[in-house]
């Protein structure tokens, strides 16, 4: 799994590539600590390179969300593939952070609330 | 006894052993045996004569003796004749015959008047002549040709020999004939000359021998030498014979002289006392007979005759002036020998006795006289005065009988003859012995010399580079030259060919005389079968005399005669057991006997020629091999695939250009290298590669290759080669062992091919192929269904045509029954036909009216103004015009109905004319009444409007929540269990499709597993509420609520009882208004035994699919068919029964499915048509599961093609598919993860494996469904089930039926799935865990647990509906079970 983080003031953009299975979730957890320490206000995670995410990976996202929400930061997921997008919507996670589907896919969609 | 006969006989007899000895000489030229035989007969003749004398002249013996002499002469003739024929040149010809005849005649002449003598002479003279001539030719042939002196001497010698042989006969003949001079010649001169000639001839022969052969003692014992020696021997023998004859004659004459010398002395003594003048005086007288001197002399003669013994006659004669006179003799006057005095002797030559002889005695004879053989001694008297003065000479002659003298003289001959015999024996014996010894020694020496020369020649030919070079022409030249030189033959040649084609071509023919090669014609084996037959057997043809060899009879005229061949030595050239040619050694001119070593030498030369042939073939083969190797190298270099070859020592033998290109290693650097040097360019280090695998089997090594395949001595494999290209390459290699003709390993060959690009393309192609196959499958299915539809259309069309015909007939009958005038016309008013009423009204027949214009029949020239038909054609609608028709004199309603074709053009106009006179009247009355009514309606409408407005306000206050109603219905119906276990390992699979046309439709169904152990059954009910208004969902709720309640009763009633009670309740319910009803199909599937009970209430029949047959149940009036429910209460409902079998499938549907084609503008399907569709699907895919069949049916009908079609959906579509599934194969894997890392690896591996299985079984979307489910399931089993303990196992089982089934079991205690919270609840949204089950439930079509909770079974629809198409069924996520489950377990 490749984890790239670009901090630009209050904005932090994270590009993740690979598969987030059980092992990847642990790696994600470690890398998310960097995000915490960056004190960004708006965290955007680019899901373009993520082909698979399991429940553990989703759990780590929610941990990050809670940590960000504590200090008033927002989390949004962009360029989410259709399959992961449907999964997250079925879980109603779009109710707590913004999830936007990848635009190169037909019928791309943006749903969910902005921020928290 | 007469010793002359004895000695003569012995001498003649001695000829036989001599001749025998000569005939035993090696290569005798003359037929000596004949000479020997002549000697035998001659000897016999002599001894017979002797015997005849002894026996006193027996006539018989005389005859036998004569015959013997004749035979001897014949043998002598034969000897001469055969000798001349055998002598090489010249042959006995015409000249010889003439001379033979002449000598015969001469012999006869000399023998006359005696017939006996004449006959003997006739035979003896030619024989003697032939003998002499043959001997002369033998001796003088060639030897003396170049020596004139020798030739002349030889000729003289034999001439004299001939004459000398016959000297006695000639002498006797001459004595009585006037050839007087011959006698002295035959006595002395001829023998002397013959002797001289003989000596010269012998000397010349000796000199010839010595000059030609003598100084070369190693010369071969050729025929020339033998002939020369024969000549020498013959000459010596003849000379010896001549000498013996002369010696014998001389001895005989000496003896006679000695005998007569005494007589002569006595004669001299007696003449001493004779008056010498007396004879003279007597001679002077003319008549001296009367003279007393005559008497005195006569008395003296008598006295002398009496005094000298053996004197028979004494006479006196005188020679005067060269003439002889007889004077007196002692014979009485009357004696026959008396001669008168003075008679002359004319035959006596003047020089008969020499003049100055003195007292010498002259002996003449023996000669044949009148009284036998006589000898005369003549003595000259002492000279007288008169004589001295030249007067006469007086001689005294003493005649005696010579018989005794000759007999005694024969004794003198005997020693000479004996000596002659001994000399002959010595000569012959010594010659023969010496010749044999000499010949043997010479032969040995010559043989040694020959052997040495032959061995030298063989060694030279063996070491000859020409033979080894395979140059046949040069080899043949060398062999033939050597053969001719060593064998001293005239010619030697080599012919090569084969018996198969029969032709033998001359490769070389060497002539010794000219030292050059000449051409020779080819030989055809068919022309010389005996000869080639002998050669084919490997035998040498050696013919000393080609004219007498039966094997060469075919060559005589065609070859031997023109070429002059006398002797032949042909040795076959055998190559590989077959005749390949022949080495011919020929001798021309003279016959030659071939020696044993010459056979062997010729065979050796033939063998050398065979080796040359073999060398030529080897050279050809070597050239071919070199050519082949060159071609092989070019071919290998030309191969586009990199190829290399190793030899038996595993060193590189070939490294082609393509290999250089791919490896960058030039061939020069690689060829000859071993120790796996060929692996360096591929792997970077030395190691065995594929080419090494052909000769060894190493499983460990083979594992390093992909797709290893062995076929005999070949091996094929793929491998990743890291050292090729930037990123390595995948090479496909083929290697094969190379073996020789005996199966021994000689090397190996390997070709490789870069298939990297191909593999990539294969993968892409495979993916595209799979996709294409799917499309093809779908398209094929579409086409199949289309074909089925077309066939159905055709069938329908045929039916329609038949119905049309019936319809036409009916129409015709109906038309004729219509009282109105009905006419059919074209748009241009041309009449087609009228009905009976029309023809009657017009008063015309069909034939009179057809084809005429309508207005013509009405009596108008042109169409009526405002013609309804014209107007109908223009407006293309039904036009009705009331008008007054003058033709009929009444008002007619003209109603024209245009019939349009597919393009909308008017084809026919149906015009109906009705008398409306009465109607007109009624219309008027009605119009009036209508006006009145309208008034009343207006008043009433105003009243109703006010009422409606109040009702609308009321409805708004009590609006029905559709979603809530749906959820209630879903709660009541729940989700049909997809899988229910049946006894016997069977599985009841149920899939459902529900597409409401509005937010909530009137179609609803439920499936329940009922009954306890032993009586389990599955209940299925599919209902279709009438109408689609808002209240129908409430009716659905009501209906299923009542139905479910009835099923929950303790004593579950039967199907018909339940339905009967339901029907009664519905009918009694206020919720169902008048006219509300529902159709339903209700079935119970007994689990054991498998059986189906069905009850339909006005519902479309369901389909039973059994193998490829499809049944519609129930039939219209069959058991199970009832009225729709809710229409009539207290019905006695009928139930149908049907046994079920494993593999049976059922399709239940509502009528909305039949209307799907209407979405696309087609007509509604009938149940039968739907059945046909399903049959077609089954025919195309007889093994398809029910879910596949249902999906295919939906696709066929077109409902799944796109979502816009669903916008045109007219009615709810509900379909249930049921199948009695057979147990399918279980695939199982067991893992024992040590930690999360290994669990992850297992999960990834299993995902790939199971994804492949899904693909193989046609299960779609593994990426979206399987990966996540598998991960979560395994994670749960490991973490929660096995408590993350290492060593605990997790088992995965898969089965593929209608669904893909995945079962995961762990070794844990299990859990209760009901206790897991809903992660989508608001309070649980931000919890980081607890979503695994949710994901599993979301992605799997059905999830079940066992009772313990440690085995989870997931079912995945093979063909999930695309998102957006699937409607309804959301309530399956509801975990609340209103009704007590029976038969199924776990959660659905």
Image: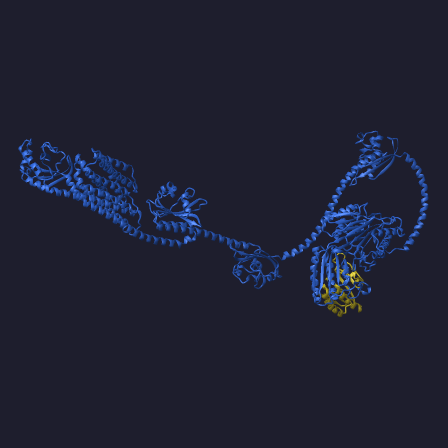
Chain colours: A yellow, B blue
The C terminus of chain B is located in which quarter?
Answer: bottom right
Q: Position of residue B6 (x, y in %)?
A: 20, 42
Q: Position of residue B1225 (x, y in %)?
A: 70, 56
Question: Residue reaching furthest bottom?
Answer: A37
Relative to B733, does residue B820 appear above or below in the rendering? Answer: above
Q: How many marks?
A: 0
Residue A84 lies in quadrant: bottom right
The N terminus of chain B is located in which quarter?
Answer: top left
Q: Position of residue B881 (x, y in %)?
A: 87, 36
- Say which of B1305 and B982 sits in front: B982
Is residue B1205 shown left or right of residue B531?
Answer: right
Is residue B864 shown left or right of residue B166?
Answer: right
Is residue B750 shown left or right of residue B872?
Answer: left
- Residue appearing at x 76%, y 43% in the figure: B793
- Say which of A70 and B790 sits in front: B790
Q: Position of residue A29 (x, y in %)?
A: 74, 68
Residue B76 lies in quadrant: top left
Asked whether the viewer can see residue B752, the reply is no
Residue B135 lies in quadrant: top left
- Say which of B238 and B56 sits in front: B56
Question: Residue reaching furthest front?
Answer: B55
- Say which of B1190 and B1227 sits in front: B1227
């Amino acid at each position: 799994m490749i984890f790239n983080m670009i901090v630009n003031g209050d904005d932090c953009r994270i590009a993740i590539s690979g598969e987030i299975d059980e092992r990847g979730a642990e790696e994600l957890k470690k890398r998310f600590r960097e995000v915490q320490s960056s004190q960004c206000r708006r965290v955007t995670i680019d899901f373009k390179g993520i082909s698979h995410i399991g429940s553990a990976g989703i759990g780590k996202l929610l941990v990050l969300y809670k940590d960000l929400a504590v200090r008033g930061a927002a989390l949004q997921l962009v360029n989410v593939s259709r399959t992961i997008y449907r999964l997250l919507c079925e879980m109603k996670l779009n109710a707590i952070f913004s999830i936007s589907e990848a635009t190169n896919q037909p019928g791309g969609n943006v749903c969910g609330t902005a921020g928290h | 006894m007469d010793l002359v006969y004895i000695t003569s006989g012995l001498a003649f007899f001695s000829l036989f052993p001599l001749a025998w000895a000569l005939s035993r000489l090696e290569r005798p030229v003359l037929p000596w045996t004949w000479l020997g035989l002549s000697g035998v007969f001659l000897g016999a003749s002599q001894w017979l004569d002797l015997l005849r004398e002894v026996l006193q002249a027996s006539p018989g013996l005389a005859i036998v003796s004569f015959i013997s002499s004749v035979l001897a002469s014949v043998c002598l003739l034969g000897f001469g004749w055969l000798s001349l024929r055998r002598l090489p040149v010249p042959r006995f010809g015409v000249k010889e015959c003439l001379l033979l005849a002449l000598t015969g005649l001469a012999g006869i002449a000399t023998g006359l008047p005696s017939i006996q003598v004449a006959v003997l002479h006739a035979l003896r003279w030619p024989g003697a002549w032939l003998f002499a001539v043959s001997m002369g030719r033998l001796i003088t042939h060639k030897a003396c040709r170049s020596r004139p002196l020798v030739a002349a001497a030889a000729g003289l010698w034999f001439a004299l020999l001939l004459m000398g042989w016959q000297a006695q006969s000639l002498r006797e003949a001459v004595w009585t004939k006037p050839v007087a001079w011959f006698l002295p010649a035959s006595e002395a001169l001829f023998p002397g000359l013959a002797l001289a000639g003989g000596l010269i001839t012998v000397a010349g022969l000796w000199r010839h021998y010595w000059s030609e052969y003598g100084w070369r003692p190693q010369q071969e014992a050729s025929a020339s030498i033998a002939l020369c020696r024969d000549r020498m021997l013959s000459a010596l023998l003849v000379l010896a014979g001549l000498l013996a004859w002369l010696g014998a004659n001389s001895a005989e004459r000496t003896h006679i002289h000695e005998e007569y010398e005494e007589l002569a002395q006595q004669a001299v003594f007696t003449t001493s006392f004779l008056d010498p003048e007396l004879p003279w005086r007597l001679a002077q007288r003319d008549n001296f007979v009367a003279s007393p001197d005559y008497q005195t002399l006569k008395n003296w003669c008598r006295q002398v005759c009496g005094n000298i013994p053996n004197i028979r006659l004494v006479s006196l004669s005188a020679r005067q002036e060269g003439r002889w006179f007889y004077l007196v003799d002692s014979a009485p006057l009357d004696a026959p020998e008396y001669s008168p005095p003075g008679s002359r002797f004319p035959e006596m030559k003047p020089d008969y006795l020499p003049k100055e002889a003195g007292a010498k005695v002259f002996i003449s004879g023996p000669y044949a006289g009148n009284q036998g053989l006589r000898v005369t001694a003549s003595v000259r008297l002492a000279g007288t005065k008169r004589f001295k003065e030249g007067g006469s000479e007086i001689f005294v002659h003493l005649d005696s009988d010579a018989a005794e003298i000759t007999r005694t003289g024969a004794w003198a001959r005997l020693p000479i003859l004996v000596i002659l015999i001994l000399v002959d024996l010595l000569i012959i014996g010594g010659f023969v012995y010496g010749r044999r010894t000499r010949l043997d020694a010479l032969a040995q020496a010559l043989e040694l010399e020959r052997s040495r020369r032959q061995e030298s020649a063989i060694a030279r030919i063996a070491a000859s580079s020409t033979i080894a070079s395979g140059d046949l022409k040069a080899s043949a030249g060398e062999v033939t030259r050597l053969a001719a030189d060593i064998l001293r033959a005239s010619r030697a040649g080599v012919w090569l060919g084969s018996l198969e084609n029969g032709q033998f071509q001359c490769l070389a023919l060497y002539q010794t005389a000219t030292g050059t090669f000449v051409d020779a014609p080819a030989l055809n084996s068919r022309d010389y079968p005996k000869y080639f037959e002998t050669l084919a057997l490997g035998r040498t043809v050696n013919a000393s005399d080609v004219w007498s060899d039966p094997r060469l009879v075919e060559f005589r005229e065609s070859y031997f005669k023109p070429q002059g061949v006398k002797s032949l030595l042909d040795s076959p050239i055998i190559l590989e057991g077959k005749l390949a040619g022949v080495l011919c050694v020929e001798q021309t001119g003279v016959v030659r006997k071939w020696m044993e070593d010459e056979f062997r030498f010729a065979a050796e030369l033939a063998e050398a020629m065979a080796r040359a042939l073999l060398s030529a073939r080897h050279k050809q083969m070597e050239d071919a091999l070199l050519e082949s190797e060159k071609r092989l190298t070019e071919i290998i270099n030309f191969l586009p695939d990199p190829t290399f070859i190793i030899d038996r020592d595993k060193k590189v033998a070939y490294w082609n250009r393509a290999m250089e290109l791919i490896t960058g290693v030039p061939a020069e650097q690689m060829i000859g290298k071993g120790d796996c040097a060929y692996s360096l360019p591929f792997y970077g280090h030395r190691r065995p590669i594929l080419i090494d695998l052909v000769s060894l089997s190493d499983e460990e090594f083979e594992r390093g290759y992909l797709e290893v395949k062995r076929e005999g001595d070949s091996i094929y494999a793929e491998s990743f080669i890291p050292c090729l290209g930037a990123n390595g390459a995948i090479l496909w290699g083929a290697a094969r062992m190379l073996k020789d003709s005996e199966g021994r390993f000689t090397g190996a060959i390997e070709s490789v091919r870069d298939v990297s690009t191909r593999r990539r393309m294969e993968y892409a192609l495979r993916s595209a192929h799979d996709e294409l196959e799917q499309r093809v499958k779908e398209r094929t299915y579409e086409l199949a269904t289309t074909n089925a539809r077309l066939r159905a259309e055709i069938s329908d069309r045929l039916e329609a045509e038949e119905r049309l015909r019936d319809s036409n007939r009916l129409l015709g009958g109906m038309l004729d029954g219509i009282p109105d005038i009905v006419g059919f016309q074209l748009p241009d008013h041309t009449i087609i036909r009228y009905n009976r009423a029309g023809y009657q009204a017009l008063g015309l027949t069909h034939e009179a009216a057809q084809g005429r214009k309508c207005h013509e029949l009405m009596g108008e020239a042109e169409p009526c103004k405002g013609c309804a038909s014209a107007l109908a054609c223009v407006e293309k609608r039904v036009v009705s015009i009331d008008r007054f028709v003058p033709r009929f004199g009444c008002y007619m309603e003209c109603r024209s109905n245009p019939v349009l074709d597919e393009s909308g053009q008017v084809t026919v106009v149906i015009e109906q004319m009705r008398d409306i006179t009465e109607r007109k009247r009624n219309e008027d009355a009605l119009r009036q009444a209508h006006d009145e009514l309208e008034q009343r309606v207006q008043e009433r409408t105003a009243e109703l409007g006010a009422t409606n407005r109040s009702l609308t306000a009321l409805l708004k206050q009590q609006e029905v929540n559709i979603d809530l109603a749906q959820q209630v219905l879903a709660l009541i119906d729940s989700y049909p269990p997809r899988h229910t276990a049946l006894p016997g390992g069977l599985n009841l699979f149920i899939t459902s499709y529900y597409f409401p046309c509005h937010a909530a439709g009137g179609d609803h169904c439920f499936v329940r597993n009922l009954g306890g152990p032993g009586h389990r059954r599955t209940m299925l009910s599919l209902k279709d509420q009438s109408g689609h208004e808002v209240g129908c969902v409430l009716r659905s709720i009501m209906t299923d609520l009542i139905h479910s309640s009835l099923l929950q009763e303790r004593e579950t009633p039967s199907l018909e009882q339940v339905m009967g009670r339901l029907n009664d309740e519905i009918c009694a319910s206020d919720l169902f208004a008048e006219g509300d009803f529902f159709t339903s199909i209700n079935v119970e599937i007994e689990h054991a035994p498998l059986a189906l009970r069905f009850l339909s209430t006005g519902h479309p029949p369901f389909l039973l699919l059994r193998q490829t047959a499809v049944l519609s149940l129930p039939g219209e009036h069959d058991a199970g068919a009832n009225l729709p429910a809710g229409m009539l209460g207290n019905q006695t409902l009928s139930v149908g029964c049907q046994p079920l079998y494993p593999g049976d499938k059922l399709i239940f549907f509502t009528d909305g499915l039949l209307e799907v084609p209407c979405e696309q503008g087609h007509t509604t399907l009938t149940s039968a048509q739907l059945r046909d569709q399903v049959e077609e699907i089954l025919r195309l895919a007889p093994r398809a599961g029910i879910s596949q069949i249902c999906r295919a049916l939906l696709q066929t009908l077109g409902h799944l093609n796109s979502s816009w079609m669903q916008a045109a959906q007219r009615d709810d579509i509900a379909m249930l598919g049921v199948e009695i599934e057979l147990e399918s194969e279980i695939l199982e894997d067991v893992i024992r993860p040590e930690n999360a890392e290994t669990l992850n690896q297992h999960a990834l591996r299993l995902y790939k494996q199971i994804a492949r299985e899904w693909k193989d079984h046609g299960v779609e979307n593994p990426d979206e469904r399987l990966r996540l489910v598998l991960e979560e399931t395994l994670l749960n089993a490991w973490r929660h089930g096995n408590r993350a303990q290492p060593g605990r196992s997790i088992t995965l089982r898969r089965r593929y039926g209608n669904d893909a089934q995945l079962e995961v079991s762990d070794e844990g205690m299990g859990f209760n799935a009901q206790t897991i919270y809903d992660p989508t609840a608001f309070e649980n949204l931000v919890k980081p865990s607890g979503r695994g089950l949710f994901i599993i439930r979301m992605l799997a079509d059905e999830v079940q647990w066992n009772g313990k909770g440690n085995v989870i079974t997931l079912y995945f629809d093979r063909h999930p509906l695309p998102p957006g198409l699937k409607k309804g069924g959301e309530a399956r996520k509801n975990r609340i079970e209103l009704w007590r489950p029976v038969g199924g377990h776990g959660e659905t």
